Image (tube, grey):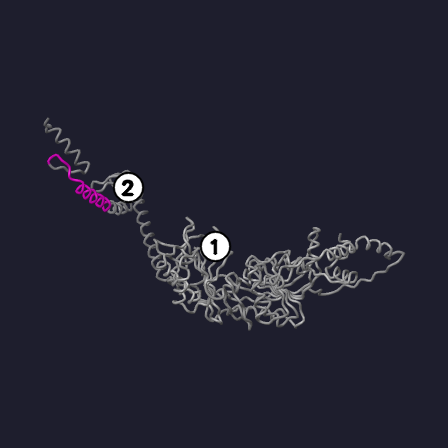
Amino acid sequence: MRETEKNKKKRMDTDARSSKPVRDGKSFGDKSERRVLKESKSLKASKLLKASKELKESKESKGSRGSKESERYQGYQSDKPSKILKEIGRDKAKDKEKDREKNKEKNTKKLKKKSLCPVSARCGGCQYLDMPYEEQLKLKQAQMQKLLGKFCGVHPIHGMENPFHYRNKVHAVFGHRKGEPVSGVYEEGTHNLVPVESCLIEDQKADEIIGTIRGMLKSFKIRTYDEDTGYGLLRHVLIRRGFTTGEILVVLVTASPVFPSKNNFVKALRQKHPEITTIVQNINDRGTSMVLGDREHVLYGKGYIEDELCGFRFRISPKSFYQVNPVQTEYLYNKAIELAGLTGKETVLDAYCGIGTIGITASAHAGQVIGVELNPDAVRDAVQNAKCNNIKNIRFYCNDATKFMTQMAEAGDGVDVVLMDPPRSGSTEEFIRAVASVKAKRVVYVSCGPDTLARDLEVFKKYGYQAKSAWPVDLFPQTYHVETVVLLSHKKADSYIHIDVEFGEGEGKIPVDSIAKRAEAYKPKEKVTYKMIKEYIEAKYGFKVHTAYIAEVKRNLGLPMYDAPNAVEELKQPRKHPTPEKVEAIKDALRYFAVI
């Protein structure tokens, strides 16, 4: 049906009002419509800004009144144009703020230095890498002053001349990315592997060897271990290098003892790096975060390296504890021996002794040294180190330091000086209490954890020891870690009070009989020592018994014991047991002293 002239006119008027022009009864296409709308909005905005200007001029001339006529401009009409103007003003202010933020961010990026290491942010190992070294030392000095200043004076921190590539122990985690083997470190607090080609604090030769191993994996078709699936062979590579000897130990940590083409692999690695001294395969088939497993196979060489420190030679195995910064370690240990104030007569206890570095260094200045360490591999190295250096006045025991000290205190044994280098977690109150029980005159505390050091100094204070001086040493440049050696000595009375007391009968006198009765009632039970038991048996039976025999009998009877067999003897041959005759003699002595 054809539309009438009236309807057609009505439709055109409606389209005109809706800003949709028509042509031959049809509207324009979408693109044209969008263009028209855009131009319309732009026109309205310009009209609105112009209107606001005229409104202001109009209101200034008419006062505060105004009218709807003054709010109408060129066909644009609104009941509340001022509200719209405010919204437009706010939008423009926001745009300006965004521009300012962008410019600020841009300028900050220009000013900010590029990091020395491309993965430092993800690795998290070198927290101070992009800070000038002098500033690092100032920061660490302030930290130590804050933590230890309340206990004693803190000396200026001892820094390094060259604070890069100092680590002689390098550990690399192996994995894969898109089918290619990669190596690096775990992102801090996670097991996400961060690929690392080279590190600014690690030994450069070690990084080079790790890169070679990474390249050899593909040609030998060796898969890296996948924690999620449990498949793959190579998990970690550990490299240790002697600072003075240059000897290099390479440890290949595998998930299985089966190592395909291992002989050819070792041969190829040695051809590329003839400087390698020994290669060891360590088997870690457990699903744990521990790096090293319990089993090892020597693939080439001796299975260990040697290094020199403080004039002594030390053997270093894959599991042995050995400080990672030999330059600073030599200063640290010499300072510890200096603070100990040894004269050549003292009995020194080296607690948490590792491979015996501090104890062996102290042996040249002491009467005798006793070393105690929980790690049996480290104890074996310590025994060998003593033999290698021809040291006769040192003994090593494989035991927990706290347990060993407690047993020494129970046995009535004494020491003059305690040298202690506990792990980052610090020592225990039981250990410190035992130190006080054996009446050690001085304690030299080497710490890699300032927080736990401050905690332990509080405990030492509780048991009568006073910190005299603290010496920070920067063993770990580019990181927030710091090593410290602290000297403690047993407190002495500052003054004495003299009291005159009259004994006897009468006013103001103290009866002697009542004192004697009270003293008898509170008389402490005499402490029976191993020495007393041994002397009793020798006097009565005519033969001697070993301390370990007494401890074994006491253990069988369910009594407290002091069992710390010499590690040297234990490693040479199995421990012998007492004969029935000696067992009965020990029991007789225990009955004599009312222990049983």
Amino acid carrying label 2: it is Pro
Using residue 261 as the reference point, say whether residue 397 is left or right of it: right
Using residue 13 as the reference point, say whether residue 504 is left or right of it: right
Quickly name the residue at label 1: 284
| Camera-side residue of 504 and 206 | 206
Q: Is residue 496 above or below residue 558?
A: below
Whether 26 is among the magenta residues is yes
Look at the image and give the residue range highlighted in magenta: 24-47
The residue positioned farthest toward the top in the image shown: 1
Q: Nearer the viewer, mark 2 or mark 1?
A: 1
- Between the residue at mark 2 and the residue at mark 1, the CA separation in whole angstroms equals 77 Å
Whether 213 is among the magenta residues is no
The residue positioned farthest toward the right in the image shown: 506
Quickly name the residue at label 2: 81
Label drawn at residue 501? none
Q: Could you tell which of marks 2 and 1 lies nearer the N-terminus?
A: 2
Q: Residue at x 48, y 54 (%)?
A: 284
